[in-house]
Amino acid sequence: MFESSFFTSLIGFFIVLTPLVFFHELGHYYAAIKSGVKVESFSIGFGPEIFGFTDKKNTRWKFSLIPLGGYVKMKGELVNFSNKILKNSFEKDTFLHANLFSRFFIVLSGPLANLLLGLLLITSLYVFHGRYTTPPIINEIIDDKPAMRAGLVSDDKIISINKIEIKDFIDIKKIVENNPNNSLSFDILRNDNVITVTVIPSKFYDEKLNKVVGRIGVTAVEPQFKTLSILSAVKFGFLDSINITFEWLKGIKALFVFEIQKKDVLGPIGIAKISGSSLDRGFSSIIFLMAILSINLGLINLLPIPALDGGYILLFTYELIFRKPLSSKIQLYLLKFGFLFILSLMILVTAFDLGL
C-alpha cells in the first residue's frame, strides 16, 4: 500500500511526531510555570540524554535517546500523599504544593495544547492552501440501483434532499445512509432546470460501521480545490476538527467493544508509513496529517487511564469530590496498572501493524 522507503518513513515519523510531542509538553510547561511550579527538565524522548541545555530558570531542555514521546519533570511527585506532614514538608514550588485548580490546569494543558495545535494547523492550511471539497454532482449511476430506478443521471447536481440544502457530496452520503427504505425527495439541477425526483435508498449492511445503512448507487466526481476566506477557513477548520474528534470517539468505542478490524488500527509502524507517504506527497499532506495526529494525541491523553493525563484528572476529581486525595498506595498501584495497560496496548497495536 505504501511505496515509501524505510528511510523516508523514519524521517517522516520524526518530522510529524516531534513537534506534536513538543507542543504537548510545552502546554504542561507553560501551565506549571504560570502556577509557580518549578520545572526541572523538559525532554523530547526518553532514556539517556543526547544533547541539551539549561536555561536561566535552571530547567534542562534536552533530546533523549528513545524518541517515542516526551515528558516535563516538575519538582515534587505527581502522586499525591495523604500524609499531611509529608505533604507540608514540600517546598512551595513543587507540584503537590500547588492548589487543586493549578494541578488540574497543569495536567489538562498538555492535551488542550494538542487540540489547539490541530485546530490551528487545519485552519492555517485552509487559509494559505485552500480546501478540497466534493461538489454534490453525480458522476456515475450504478445499474439497477435506487438512483437509476428513480431516474437520476450523470452530471445531475443535487440541490436539496427533503428541503435540506446540500453543499457537498458528503451531505448526500450522510442523509442517504441514515434513511434506508425511507422515501427521499431530491431537488436536482439538470440542464439549467430544477426537477424533483423521489428516491428510496436500499438497505445495505456496512461491516465497517457495523450497522444497516442506506445506499442509492451513485459515485461522486473528483474533489475540487477551493480557496477560502479567513472567516470560512476558521469555520471549516473548527467543523473539521469536531468531525475528527467524533470519528475518534467512534473508533475508541469500536475498539473497546471489539468491533474494530486490524486494518483500521495504526501503531508506530503504521504512522511511520503514512508519515513517509505524506512526505512524498508534499507539504500540505504533512500538515494535515500532523493536525489529525495532534487532535488524536490530545484526545488519547484525556482518556481516564492511570499514567495518562486523563488518569491524573480522574485522581484530582476524586480529591475535589471527597476533599482528600486517594491514598498514595492505591495511586501507585493504579499508576503501575496504567503503565502496564499502555505497554500492552502498544504491543497489541504494533502486532496489528505487522499483520500478526
Image (cartoon, grey):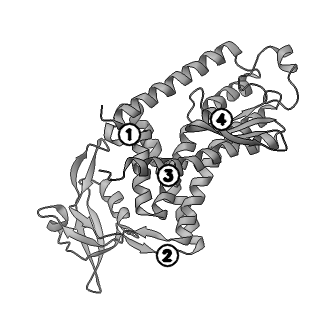
Q: Is residue 159 above or below residue 9?
A: below
What numbered label is drawn on residue 104? Answer: none
Mark 2 vs mark 4, foreground winner is: 4
Between 302 and 317, the one lying in front of the other is: 302
Does label 1 or label 3 sit earlier along the sequence? 1
Callout in the foreground (4, 3): 4
Instruction: Identify residue type, mark 4.
Output: Glu
Q: Amino acid at mark 1?
A: Val
Label 3 CA crowd tier, 10 Å (few <14, some 14–19, many 20+): many
**What residue would you read off at disc 4?**
49
Q: Which residue is mark 3?
A: 292
Q: Nearer the viewer, residue 155 or 225?
A: 225
N-terminal-most mark, 1 or 2: 2
Residue in view at x 51 percent, y 28 percent = 342
Q: Which mark is residue 227?
A: 2
Q: Is residue 140 left or right of residue 343?
A: left
Dot 4 falls on a residue whose secondary structure is strand
Marks 1/3: CA distance?
15 Å
Q: Position of residue 20 (x, y in %)?
A: 58, 48
- The tag earlier along the polypeptide, 4 or 3, is 4
* Type of amino acid under label 2: Thr
Mark-to-mark CA distance, 2 and 4: 45 Å
